[in-house]
Structure formats: C-alpha cells, structure tokens
C-alpha cells in the first residue's frame, strides 16, 4: 500500500514535469488524436514530445512486460496511472489498434519471434495497424469469411476482399483473418495473419460515410504473399484469437459511452447552450432528458469499473463485453442525439463558422455506426440471451 | 476508493443472509402475514433471530452493541430481503433509527435507546412525509415552544411500522415557511404519548404503513433530536442511508423477478417450442440483463461511498435509487407480461414482486424525485 502511495507520488511528479500544457486540454476535433505510424503527421511538437516521453516509459502500454517495451506495471499501478492522467486531464498520448487489439493478441497467442518483432514498435507508436475482419459477404456472420490463403510451403498466397477496415489507407500493417481450410466447418479453417500494407497486391480505397468522412476502407488482396512466421497462434485455429480480439474491440467501442478526459460533460454543454433558470436548466423537458442520460451514462461508467475490478479479483464475468458493447454504444448514440437537440440549428451547420464547434453533425452521424461495427446491437443481444441467459 | 467487489467479510454476510432469509423469511411468510392480517405485520420471532444474526446491529457502533459492519454489509442483507420479500422492521429501526440516533442523538439518548435496539427490544419509525409524494422539506407539522418543551400539531403519512414503533422520529417546523429547509427540527416522540393517534393502513405490498396525527402533543426539551432548526441536514443524511438500502432491496427484487422469468421462458412451451427460443423475448431479456448489471454497480458504489464518507455520496445515492427504481419497474412489469396469464394470478409470486417494488420505489422518493435531486446536486 505504501509502495502504491510512493508510485502515485512519483507518477504525479513525472506527469507534472513531462506532460506539455497543451496536451492537458480537451480535443476540439477527432483528428487531434495521435495515431502514430510511418506516415503520421504530428499536429504539434507537444504532441510528438508527449508520445515520445510516454513511449519511453512504456506507458502507452503500461501493463505490457518491459521486455517488449511495455511499462511492466501491476493492475493497481495501472489504475493509479489512469487516475493521475485523468487528474491532469491529459490527452491520450497514443490511440492505437496495436495497443488495444492486436498487441494483446500477440502477447497471448503469438510466438516469441512475433512478440519481439511487433510489440516494441506498437508501444513506440511507430507502426499503425488496421483490422481485416469483415468482408462484403461476412459482416455479423463473420465466420463465413471467404478470403482464401493457399499454403505454398513457407508462405501463403492470399486472395480476397476486406471491408470496413478502419483507417486502412493510413495503416502500415494489417491483422487479417483468412480461410486456410475451405473443407473444414466454417469456424475451424480460419487463420490470423499479419502483413505489411506495402506488400505487392494490397490496395485500399476509402469508403465515404454519411458523415462525409472516410475512416473506413475496403481493401483488395490480390496474390498477396504472407510468410508463415507471421501467423498468430496455430494455423486453422484463428477463430479463438478472432473472438478474443472482438472482445477487446467491443470493450473499446463500448468505452465510447464514457465521457473522455477533458471532454465537456453533457450538462455543461446544456448549460452553455440554454442557460440556467433558478439553478435549473431553463428548458424543463431537456433537463429531464439530460438527467436521464446522465444517470445511465454514470451507471454505465461504474459498470465498466466494476467489470474491471471483478476481472482483477479473478471473478469471471462471462460475456460481459457483449453487454458493455451493447449498452455503451446506445449511451453514446443517445448523447449525440441530445447534443444535436441542445445545440439546435447550430448542430446542423455542415460548413461555415459554427462548424468549428466540434464538427457536431459529423460526429453525430458517425455515431450511428457504433451499434453496427464490431457486431450489431442485435448480435450482442443474441450473445447475451444465448450465452449468458441460456435462452435458445 | 475501494474496488467494486465485496471483501471476504461482506461476502460472508451475503451468504449468511441468503441462507437465513430463504429459510426463515421466505415469500410464503409474507403470504401468511397478509392472509392472517397479522397484528404486527411482521414476525417478532423473526426479529429476534435477526438480532441474533447481527443484522439489526450491522450499522451500529460496537460500543452500543453493534458490529459497525457498514452499509455495504447491510446492503447484502437488504438485497437478499428483496429476493425473498422478507418482512421486518429493518429499515425503520436498524437503518433509520440507528443512523438518526448515531448522527444526532445526545449521549443520554444514544445510551438509552441504541442498546435497546441492538437487543431487539425497541422499534422506531420515521414520520417525515405529509404529502403522497416524498418531499422532506415540506413540513407543516409544527412544534411550538411551551415551557421547557414543545407542543406538536399536524399529521404524517406513509409512516412505515408506525403502528408498532415505540419511538417515532418526527420532523416538525420550529421556524420558517412551508418549504424551507431551515427551521425543521427532529423529535423523538413516544407512540403512546397523549395526543398521538396512529391509524394503521395496509398497503398494496401487504405491509403496513401508518397515518400519524399529533394533536397538542407535549414533549420535553429532551425529546429534541439534534439541534433545533437543523433537522433537515440530519434527515438528508439519514434518508441517503435509507435510500441506498432501499436501492439494494430493489436490486434484489428486480434480480429475483428476472431470474424467475428467464427460468419460466426456458420451460414453458407454446407453438411446440420453448418461449425462450423467440428472439423478440430474448432481446427484451438481454436488455433487462444489461440494465440489471448497471443497477448492481450503482448500488454497490452508493453503499461504499456512504461507508467511505465520500463527498459525492448523496449524488451516488440518488443515482442508485433512481436507477434501481427504474429497472425494478421494468423487471417486474416484464415478469408479469412474460408469464402471460399466469403472471396475473395471485398464486404466482411475480405479482408480489411488482407490488413490493412500487412501494419501495415510492418510499423516500422514486425515479423522478431522485433524478431531479441528482440533477440539482450536479448543478443543473
């Protein structure tokens, strides 16, 4: 306990000294996040400095072992670090599918060689990853994927098409599900492979969304050569890893239901937009709606905290990730709808001066995808009903 | 802040409460009390057993005979009481009476009353509301100074266990206007004092509440509980503790109604298949499951915040009471609907869960009251 206290003191002092002031302010737009990678253009020197300093300590992946570049912190120390970062309202030094998704999978299932090759660059934000899961004919029914990998001895030749690959146009490497045994039952012939996006035969095209932006892409794989040492886990046994990764993805998407550090809370937006009357929001109906949302959002945050605490205490929580994904995305979508309602016609300005106020209509429209990506809300409800409640 | 998991002692208390209440205070006991129109409305024998189990002293300091196990511990008892629809004066005496005395009581009051509560010999009841919807600041009952004491006039409703309590804890106005928080004082009044009349009512949940009238009731200065005119602050804290425990009870009610319903869906066949195979019902159950997970978190957090004396404890209590009320309403409504015609029968228990849920929701503020309080505490 005293050790933890000392750790908190040290962490606080280090953050005070090393977190630039400009990294302690809220994001004003989505593109201010730091994603790293070979082609990343830093928005400011502070952003670069903040990433370098955090990566140096391994604190972009604080719970990973130090031998792979991580911070080597215990669960309790990680919690202290999170709290201290939140205390100074620090922006995340790195947003990374590498840290959130493929890194943990490589740690758990990958060979020693894969760990040494891939984990340290992820920690340092040098390589940006994208996820090749869905296909035009395999969305919610992911196990029906068709991208074919033919065994050529020391390597595979991969042909097929991936869709909804977030930021594939900006990514350096892809973690990709391919079918290595077309004869086997559909979950059994799948393998998780890694390849560089610069490999000949890989091409990518952005998909413009209703938000006007293109975080998603479709990727075409045309005779792409993938070395066998880039297989994560066993050949034909990729489905287990895929599900493990999906769990992380669900938690990540579900986490969007939480108010991010430095973000204005919904009541703050409401007070700014419509004002107070005798200490209460001037619009009684909106006050009720904001309150109903805040009660659910706070309850959801506490539930994420409890699920984490239970996991640390070794209490199995079953398919908690499906519940967190389902509820978190619904909370986030409701938040976006309320933001539009609170800001009225200002929220609908697509271009122009008011647009700068957080690019609201685009964020609102983007949020509609939250309950579709990573398994729709309906799929999550199926998972809860069948796997947890035993209804079938 | 402690982790949101039970420690070993709390888990043991939960297990003990689970075994004891399902054995000694099951739903069949509630039916029996109801059908016999029992005079006390609860089993005195059960109350003595609860004393021996340590439930009554859970919030009480050791020097008065309690175990000071705290709100998280007591919450486990209330959750299990919710699951079994167990009837006992735990809320009115072991929670409200104990808290009010420990917070505001003089040394004499504490020494005279707390050990008696710990031994199961003294019951208390809180007489706070005067209107059908909870509003603790709206006090028109007056306490006018007279000699060295006061004279009380007015009436109170929805006084849980009011007809059996030995001591009534009464909020009365010694200054200020109808809705002012300042000027409210608390008094300890003997139920059998001259001028106190108690009308017992049977509520929809088959439990008792009372309407209490005060007609020129004379009390000594020693009946004052806490500082004169400062009663609201005490009341606010006591109600936080009571509402956190009610939230725990509502969690138990909602969880049990839900689990019984899921089991029913797994067994009951229509159109040649079990009801649970229909996606329309599966999705409603899965949503309800998610809501219940949220209630578990907020209830535990509120209980822990009270034990830790956290600054935001009141906010968290209102969050817990609001959310548990909302979800208990959904869970019991769905339970009746998904049981179909059987859910409408008195023979099936689900209707009893719905009735108790509504009473526990409304007592000391429902979803709407606590959502409003939450928003005000959050500054909007």
Image (tube, coloured by chain):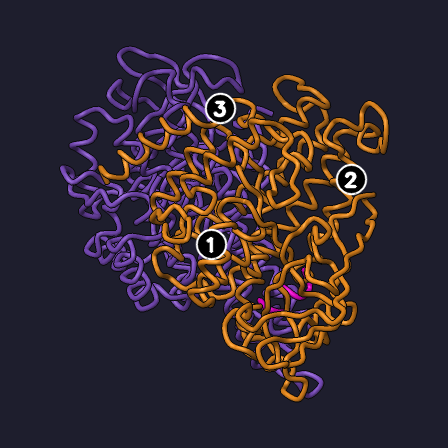
Which chain's colour is purple?
A: B
Residue A376 in the image: above or below residue B178? below
B203 magenta-colored = no
Between the C-alphas of marks 3 and 1, the distance is 31 Å
Chain of the residue under the numbered disc 1 shown in the image: B
On the same chain: label 2 and label 1? no
Quarter the C terminus of chain B occupies:
top right
Residue B358, horizontal then vertical, whole percent = 54, 51
Asked whether the viewer can see residue B286, the reply is yes
Contact between labelled residues 2 and 3, with CB atoms less than 8 Å apart: no
Between the C-alphas of marks 2 and 1, the distance is 39 Å
Residue A107, horizontal then vertical, whole percent = 45, 61
A380 magenta-colored = yes
- Left of A42 or right of it: where is A356? right
Residue, x 69% and y 37% (percent of image)? A31
Residue A293, horizontal then vertical, whole percent = 63, 40
Magenta region, residue range:
A377-384
User: To which residue does mark 1 refer?
Assistant: B251
Quarter the N terminus of chain B occupies:
top left
Which chain's colour is orange?
A: A
Main secondary-structure element of the magenta-colored stretch = helix
Q: Nearer the viewer, mark 3 or mark 2?
A: 2
Asked whether the viewer can see residue B167, the reply is no
User: To which residue does mark 2 refer?
Assistant: A362
User: To which residue does mark 3 refer?
Assistant: B139
Q: Secondary structure at mark 1?
A: helix
Chain of the residue under the numbered disc 2 shown in the image: A
Residue B233 in the image: above or below residue B57? above
Residue, x 33% and y 17% (percent of image)? B150
Q: Nearer the viewer, mark 3 or mark 1?
A: 1
Q: Secondary structure at mark 3?
A: loop
Q: Nearer the viewer, mark 2 or mark 1?
A: 2
């Amino acid at each position: 306990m005293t050790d933890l206290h000392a750790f908190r003191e040290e962490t606080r002092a280090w953050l005070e000294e090393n977190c630039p002031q400009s990294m302690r302010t809220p994001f004003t737009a989505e593109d201010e996040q730091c994603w790293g990678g070979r082609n990343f253009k830093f928005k400011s020197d502070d952003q670069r400095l903040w990433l370098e300093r955090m990566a140096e300590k391994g604190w972009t992946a604080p719970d990973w072992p130090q031998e792979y570049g991580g911070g080597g912190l215990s669960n309790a120390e990680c919690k202290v670090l999170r709290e201290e970062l939140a205390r100074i309202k620090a922006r995340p030094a790195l947003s990374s599918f590498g840290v959130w998704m493929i890194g943990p999978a490589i740690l758990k299932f990958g060979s020693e060689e894969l760990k040494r090759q891939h984990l340290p660059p992820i920690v340092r934000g040098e390589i940006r990853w994208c996820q090749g899961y869905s296909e035009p004919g395999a969305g919610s029914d992911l196990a029906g994927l068709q991208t074919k990998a033919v065994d050529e001895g020391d390597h595979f030749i991969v042909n097929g098409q991936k869709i909804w690959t977030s930021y594939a146009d900006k990514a350096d490497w892809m973690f990709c599900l391919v079918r290595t045994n077309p004869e086997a039952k559909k979950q059994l012939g799948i393998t998780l492979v890694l390849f560089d996006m610069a490999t000949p035969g890989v091409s990518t095209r952005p998909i413009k969304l209703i938000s006007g932006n293109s975080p998603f892409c479709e990727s075409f794989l045309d005779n792409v050569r993938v070395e066998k040492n880039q297989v994560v886990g066993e050949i034909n046994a990729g489905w287990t890893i895929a599900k493990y990764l999906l769990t992380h993805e669900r938690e990540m998407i579900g986490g969007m239901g939480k108010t991010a550090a430095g973000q204005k809370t919904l009541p703050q937006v409401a007070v700014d937009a419509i004002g107070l009357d005798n200490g209460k929001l001037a619009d009684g109906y909106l006050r009720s709606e904001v309150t109903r949302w805040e009660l659910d959002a706070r309850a959801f945050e506490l539930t994420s905290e409890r699920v984490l605490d239970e996991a640390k205490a070794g209490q199995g929580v079953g398919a908690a990730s499906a519940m967190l994904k389902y509820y978190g995305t619904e909370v986030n979508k409701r938040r976006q709808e309320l933001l539009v309602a609170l800001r009225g016609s200002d929220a609908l300005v697509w271009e122009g001066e008011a647009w700068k106020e957080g690019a609201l209509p685009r964020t609102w429209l983007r949020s509609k995808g939250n309950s579709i990506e990573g398994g729709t809300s309906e799929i999550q409800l199926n998972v809860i009903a069948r796997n947890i409640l035993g209804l079938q | 802040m402690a982790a949101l998991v039970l420690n070993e002692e709390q888990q043991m208390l939960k297990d003990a409460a689970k075994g004891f209440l399902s054995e000694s205070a099951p739903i069949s006991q509630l039916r029996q009390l109801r059908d016999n129109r029992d005079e006390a409305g609860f089993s005195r024998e059960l109350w003595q057993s609860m004393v021996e189990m340590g439930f009554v002293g859970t919030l009480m300091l050791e020097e008065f005979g309690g175990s000071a196990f705290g709100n998280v511990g007591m919450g486990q008892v209330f959750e299990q009481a919710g699951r079994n629809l167990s009837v006992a004066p735990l809320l009115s005496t072991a929670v409200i009476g104990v808290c009010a005395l420990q917070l505001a009581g003089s040394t004499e009051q504490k020494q005279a009353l707390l050990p008696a509560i710990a031994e199961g010999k003294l019951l208390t009841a809180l007489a706070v509301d005067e209107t059908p919807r909870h509003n603790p600041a709206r006090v028109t009952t007056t306490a006018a100074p007279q000699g060295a004491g006061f004279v009380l006039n007015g009436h109170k409703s929805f006084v849980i266990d009011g007809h059996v309590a030995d001591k009534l804890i009464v909020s009365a106005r010694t200054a200020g206007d109808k809705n002012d928080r300042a000027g409210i004082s608390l008094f300890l009044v003997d139920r059998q004092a001259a001028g106190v009349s108690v009308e017992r009512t049977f509520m929809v949940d088959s439990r008792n509440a009372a309407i209490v009238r005060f007609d020129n009731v004379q009390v000594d200065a020693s009946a004052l509980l806490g500082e004169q005119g400062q009663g609201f602050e005490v009341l606010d804290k006591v109600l936080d503790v009571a509402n956190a425990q009610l939230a725990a009870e509502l969690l138990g009610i909602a969880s049990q109604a839900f689990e019984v319903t899921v089991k029913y869906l797994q067994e009951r066949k229509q159109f040649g298949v079990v009801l649970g195979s229909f996606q329309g019902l599966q999705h409603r159950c899965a949503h309800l499951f998610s809501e219940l997970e949220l209630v578990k978190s907020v209830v535990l957090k509120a209980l822990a915040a009270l034990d830790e004396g956290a600054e935001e404890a009141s906010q968290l209590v209102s969050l817990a009471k609001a959310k548990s009320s909302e979800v208990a309403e959904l869970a019991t409504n769905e339970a009746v609907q998904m049981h179909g015609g059987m859910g409408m029968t008195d023979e099936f228990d689900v209707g009893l869960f719905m009735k108790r849920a509504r009473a526990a929701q409304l007592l000391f503020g429902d979803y709407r009251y606590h959502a409003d309080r939450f928003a005000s505490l959050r500054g909007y």
